[in-house]
Image: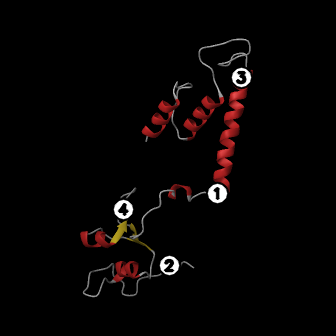
């Protein structure tokens, strides 16, 4: 259970022979997981603690102890459950399929019935557009080569 408490010695933290005192000492020995205090950033403190980036300049800082673990490659998947990721993938495919069918059945689409055009809008094109929209990229409706599509997708950051 999380608790809010004041540091026992009432100091922000100074280096000692055996460790640190105050807020910094509580963070380093694991007594506290997070600090919210008007604590200034010093070189000595920055070696041992992770300071938050300021988004509003004031005399208050938020601190947490540094983590000694590596971030896994698929850490971006952690905020959502497996079921939600599966629902997102299924809904993207259903949307792409619906868009492709709509384009094929529409008389004004890129591939209307009875007309042959140089540019056809297929299920692959619909997937390309839907995934581009998901990642906030504007994409051309028909890139000619799949290899070029793959290179273009991974070159954008």
Q: Is residue 132 above or below residue 34?
A: above
Between circles 3 and 4, the one closer to the viewer is 3
Whole-number angstrom distance, CA of label 3 to CA of label 1: 33 Å
Q: Residue furthest top?
A: 115
Between circles 1 and 4, the one closer to the viewer is 1
Write down the residue under mark 4. 58
Can residue 41 be seen in the rendering of this structure? yes
Dot 3 falls on a residue whose secondary structure is helix
- Confirm or deny contact between disc 3 and disc 4 (CB under 8 A): no
Whole-number angstrom distance, CA of label 1 to CA of label 4: 40 Å
Between circles 2 and 4, the one closer to the viewer is 2
Q: Nearer the viewer, residue 145 or 125?
A: 145
Compare marks 3 and 1 and give the one earlier in the sequence.
Answer: 1
Between circles 2 and 3, the one closer to the viewer is 3
Q: Which label belongs to residue 104?
A: 3
Write down the residue under mark 2. 4
Q: Quadrant of residue 105?
A: top right
Seen at 66% across and 12% down, the residue is: 116
Seen at 73% across and 20% down, the residue is: 106
């Amino acid at each position: 259970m999380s608790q809010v408490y004041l540091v026992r010695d009432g100091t922000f933290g100074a280096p000692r022979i055996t460790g640190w005192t105050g807020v910094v000492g509580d963070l380093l020995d694991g007594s506290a997981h997070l600090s919210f205090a008007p604590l200034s950033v010093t070189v000595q403190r920055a070696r041992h603690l992770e300071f938050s980036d300021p988004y509003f300049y004031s005399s208050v800082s938020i601190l947490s102890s540094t983590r000694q673990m590596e971030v896994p490659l698929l850490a971006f998947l952690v905020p959502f459950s497996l079921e939600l990721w599966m629902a997102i993938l299924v809904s993207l495919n259903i949307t792409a399929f619906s868009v492709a069918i709509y384009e094929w059945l529409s008389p004004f689409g890129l591939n209307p019935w009875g007309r042959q055009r140089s540019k056809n809008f297929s299920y692959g094109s619909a997937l390309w557009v839907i995934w581009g929209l998901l990642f906030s990229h504007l994409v051309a409706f028909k890139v000619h080569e799949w290899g070029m599509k793959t290179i273009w997708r991974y070159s954008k950051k």
